[in-house]
Image (cartoon, helix red, strand yellow):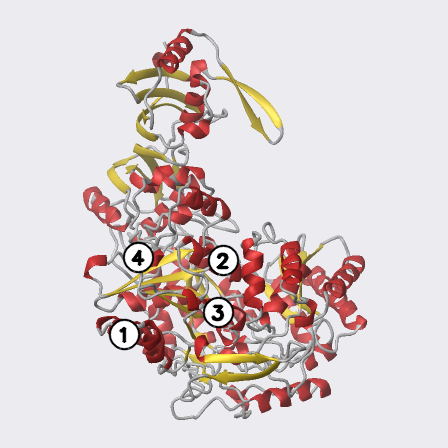
């Protein structure tokens, strides 16, 4: 059941076909027939979201390191691809091997957020796998879930054979080896699940039976195997024990977080009472600065990314940041690689840190006060003051930042109308601080989301406000926030409602989920696709009230996740809830001693906090690397040296389904990996000085592409550079020649194409071509932004020659200053056909030459 259809019969007909190619640099392509266990790791959202997810990448590389274990990837298709697969009766396949998901031994599906749940059903159904675990037969893959929603997977538990709670680095290998052994010993499906249940952190939903009261609350959760009364979250004791992403996957298309992410620490014990991550990822485990630097160095060298993100729940709390950050900037600033810290906490974003991160480009600046008033920040244990926030903003504006994003929640427990007004007041004060210290036009972006109570937090018993209440608070903010210099954005209250339903939901929601999915619910995290009416209709059919799932819970109520142990005692959560009512502060156990949450045994599981080193002890970082150019120079400071080269290359095969901007990014990254340093543009966001030829239509192969690169130093060996650059390019891109260039890009071209049609030309179509060639003018209409423009196609076609029954040779003129006509667009107009009928044709650019007056005669 491997792919038996050509990509050009599918990819030309979907939006962003690059999502479905695979072929990424650093992707693994192991032999299927030599694998004793096959795994497909699946992210249940679109490619651009899933490729940004670190967890899946880490597990992908860990599994593929093991002999005999194959791990491929798959992402949820968009609605157009889903429809096309159904129309052609094709299964959903993995990116690397192209095998149907049904053929794998293990499917590992990430559970990242509640609004992706319908996508899981889409994926299973397209793979011809029964949605319900109980309906799967022997020989079908084991469906495993895991991720942050795994600590209350009950709404989707019926769709999974097994779910991993907690950290996956060690557990995923144990799970894979267990399934491989069960497969070898030919154990039945129930026997395999029992073996998996013995692995710490693995939850088998079918081994637990919830019993409901008449009012919908849970009477009890009965373990069907007394050996496993509860399941405790798996905790990786030390991050340094597991290799990180030294060879990260490099995306083919633009993704949400298009950068190298380095996890510098896991866990946060600041103790924000609304924060689920602060509970389910504790304790704090920091990597050493030496390991972080080595991961960053190898990751950048092996990927070609131009941004490095230091990742943790609160990057500013990393204990050695003041020594690590200057070392990273010293290493990467000359390479024009910026360092960003997406999760900085107010109070930890010091002026020294800002001085460092602005050395290359000013990356995004987001602060999360969460609540507008001091009182409410005490309730949630945020631990920051108004002055902390304003001091940070004052420093940022003073150092040249122009845009500040502030994130708040509405509907927090104990919130009053005055607390909502305080959001606007704090935003106004931020703008005033900027006006006093900053220069130029400043922008304050206020982002608001509805508070959703999460399992395993002190607020898990609290109510969630209704959609009407959310809208009322948002309307209030819209009314009182100044219009000038401020922008208010908010998360859709309808989506927050559904998130709240599934966040604390139980197994009754499986019927709701399946019913809404059958009605067409898809990709609910995307506002363009989300439709609450489908869920409301489905809830009525399932005799469920959505609002009932938003209610407050009694402290003695059995919660749907009661049998799933995060490691943090329920008593600790109740104590924290009481402290919220009294506005009492709980300090960070990293710095103020154990707060008795119950997780650590202080033997294996304990906080790991690195100690700041003195200047003398700090690691001496090497500054040089092998290059095909002269010794390293600072690309930002060299302004008077320009050595230009034309790189001629081909793009053949499926890589032709990437767009022009995607190809540019691939080449920029290949140049970085090849250690070919370019000059850079100046300004806010420096970019490589590389000029490309005209953009090719998506789906067009080419034997004659080129780009011109502007370098600060000459290349010492053109042939060696060509070989080395080819080693860094993905399949389908190949450098044919590198020559010296004067730097000029031709503005008028004659481009030659070979077109192989899927169906032979009819006699009528041949006659239309002959007639076209006799004409002096042939107008086609081009619609752009609601306006219609006529283009005379005839003088743009210099040659249109029929060879055999279905092959054409076409020469067309293109000018940089004029709107062009795509080859298939031109042919469709000449043949009087719908262009979609030609999209499966094989279109190859065979050559080009500069247009001169002589060639027009």
Question: Which of the 4 image quadrants contains residue 145?
Answer: bottom left
Q: Is residue 731 above or below residue 123?
A: above
Q: Which residue is mark 3?
A: 158
Q: Which residue is mark 4?
A: 26
The one of 730 and 517 positioned closer to us in this rendering: 517
Question: In the image, 324: left or right of 524?
Answer: left
Q: Which residue is mark 1?
A: 187
Marks 4 and 1, how far apart at CA: 35 Å
Q: Secondary structure at mark 1?
A: loop
Camera sees residue 268: no
> Which quarter of the rendering shows the C terminus?
top left
Camera sees residue 548: yes
Marks 4 and 2, how far apart at CA: 27 Å
Question: In the image, 557: left or right of 336?
Answer: right
**Is disc 2 in contact with disc 1, using a CB cutoff of under 8 Å?**
no
Q: Which residue is mark 2?
A: 119
Q: Is residue 157 above or below residue 96?
A: below
Marks 2 and 1, how far apart at CA: 30 Å
The residue that appears at 59% across and 62% down in the rendered structure is 399
Marks 4 and 3, how far apart at CA: 35 Å
Marks 2, 1: nearer the viewer: 1
Q: Which of the marked residues, 4 or 1, is nearer the chain's N terminus? A: 4
Q: Which of the marked residues, 3 or 2, is nearer the chain's N terminus? A: 2
Report x, y in % for residue 189: 33, 72
Q: Secondary structure at mark 3?
A: helix
The one of 548 and 355 positioned closer to us in this rendering: 548
Q: Secondary structure at mark 2?
A: helix
Marks 3, 2: nearer the viewer: 3
Question: In the image, 700: left or right of 485?
Answer: left
């Amino acid at each position: 059941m491997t792919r038996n259809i050509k990509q050009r019969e599918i990819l030309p007909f979907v939006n962003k076909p690059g999502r479905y190619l695979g072929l990424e640099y650093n992707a693994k392509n192991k032999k299927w027939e030599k694998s004793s266990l096959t795994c497909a790791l699946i992210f249940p959202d679109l490619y651009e979201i899933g490729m940004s997810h670190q967890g899946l990448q880490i597990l992908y590389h860990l599994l593929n390191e093991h002999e005999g274990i194959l791990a491929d990837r798959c992402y949820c298709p968009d609605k157009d691809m889903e429809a096309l697969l159904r129309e052609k009766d094709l299964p959903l396949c993995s990116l690397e091997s192209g095998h149907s998901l049904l053929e794998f031994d293990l499917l590992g599906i990430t559970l990242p957020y509640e609004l992706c749940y319908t996508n899981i059903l889409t994926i299973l159904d397209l793979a011809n796998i029964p949605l319900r675990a109980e309906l799967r037969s022997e020989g079908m893959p084991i469906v495993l879930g895991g991720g942050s929603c795994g600590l209350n997977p009950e709404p989707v538990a019926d769709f999974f054979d097994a779910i991993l709670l907690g950290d996956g680095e060690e557990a995923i290998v144990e799970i894979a080896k267990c399934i491989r052994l069960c497969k070898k010993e030919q154990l039945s499906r129930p026997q395999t699940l029992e073996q998996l249940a013995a692995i710490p952190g693995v939850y088998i939903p079918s081994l637990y039976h919830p019993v409901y009261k008449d009012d919908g609350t849970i009477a009890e959760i009965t373990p069907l195997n007394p050996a496993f009364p509860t399941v405790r979250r798996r905790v990786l004791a030390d991050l340094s024990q597991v290799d990180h992403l030294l060879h990260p996957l490099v995306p083919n298309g633009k993704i949400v977080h298009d950068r190298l992410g380095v996890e510098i620490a896991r866990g946060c014990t600041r103790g924000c009472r609304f924060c689920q991550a602060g509970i389910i990822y504790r304790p704090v485990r920091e990597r050493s600065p030496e390991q972080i630097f080595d991961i960053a160095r190898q990751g950048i060298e092996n990927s070609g990314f131009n941004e490095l993100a230091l990742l943790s729940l609160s990057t500013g709390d990393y204990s050695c940041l003041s020594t690590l950050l200057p070392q990273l900037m010293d290493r990467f600033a000359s390479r024009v690689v910026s360092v960003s810290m997406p999760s900085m906490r107010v109070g930890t974003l010091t002026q020294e840190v800002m001085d460092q991160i602005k050395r290359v480009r000013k990356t995004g600046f987001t602060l999360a006060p969460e609540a507008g008033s001091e009182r409410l920040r005490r309730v949630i244990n945020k631990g920051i003051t108004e002055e902390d926030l304003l001091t940070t903003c004052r420093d940022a504006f003073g150092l040249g930042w122009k845009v500040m994003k502030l994130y708040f929640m509405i509907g927090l427990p104990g919130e009053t109308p005055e607390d909502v007004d305080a959001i606007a007041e704090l935003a106004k004060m931020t703008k005033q601080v900027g006006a006093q210290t900053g220069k130029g036009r400043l922008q304050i972006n206020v982002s608001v989301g509805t508070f959703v109570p999460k399992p395993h937090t002190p607020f898990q018993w609290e109510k969630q406000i209704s959609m009407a209440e959310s809208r009322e608070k948002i309307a209030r903010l819209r009314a009182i926030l100044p219009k000038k210099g401020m922008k208010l954005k908010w998360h859709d209250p309808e989506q927050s409602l559904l998130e709240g339903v599934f966040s604390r939901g139980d197994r009754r929601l499986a019927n709701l989920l399946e019913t809404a999915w059958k009605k067409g619910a898809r990709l609910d995290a995307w506002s363009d696709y989300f439709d609450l009416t489908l869920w409301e209709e489905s809830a009525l059919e399932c005799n469920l009230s959505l609002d009932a799932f938003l209610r407050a819970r009694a402290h003695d109520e059995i919660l749907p996740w009661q049998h799933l142990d995060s490691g943090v005692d329920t008593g600790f959560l109740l104590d924290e809830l009481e402290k919220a009512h009294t506005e009492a502060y709980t300090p960070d156990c990293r710095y103020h001693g154990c707060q008795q949450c119950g997780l650590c045994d202080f033997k294996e599981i304990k906080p790991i906090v690195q100690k700041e080193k003195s200047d003398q002890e700090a690691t001496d970082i090497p500054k040089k690397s092998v290059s095909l150019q002269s010794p390293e120079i600072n690309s930002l400071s060299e302004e008077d040296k320009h050595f230009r080269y034309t790189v001629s290359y081909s793009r053949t095969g499926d890589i032709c389904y990437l767009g022009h901007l995607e190809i540019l990014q691939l080449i920029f990254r290949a140049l970085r990996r090849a250690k070919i340093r370019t000059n850079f543009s100046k300004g806010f966001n420096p970019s490589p000085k590389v000029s490309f030829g005209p953009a090719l239509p998506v789906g067009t192969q080419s034997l004659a592409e080129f780009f011109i690169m502007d370098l600060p130093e000459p290349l010492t060996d053109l042939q060696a550079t060509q070989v080395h650059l080819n080693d860094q390019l993905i399949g389908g891109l190949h450098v044919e020649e590198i020559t010296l260039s004067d730097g000029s890009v031709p503005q008028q071209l004659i481009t030659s194409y070979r077109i192989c049609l899927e169906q032979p030309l009819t006699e009528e179509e041949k006659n239309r071509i002959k007639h076209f060639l006799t004409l002096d003018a042939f107008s086609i209409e081009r619609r752009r932004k609601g306006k219609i423009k006529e283009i005379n196609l005839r003088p743009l076609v210099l040659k249109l020659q029929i060879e055999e029954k279905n092959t054409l040779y076409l020469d067309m003129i293109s000018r940089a200053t004029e709107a062009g006509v795509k080859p298939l667009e031109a042919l469709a107009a000449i043949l009087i056909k719908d262009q979609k009928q030609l999209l499966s044709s094989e279109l190859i650019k065979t050559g080009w030459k500069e247009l001169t007056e002589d060639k027009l005669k």
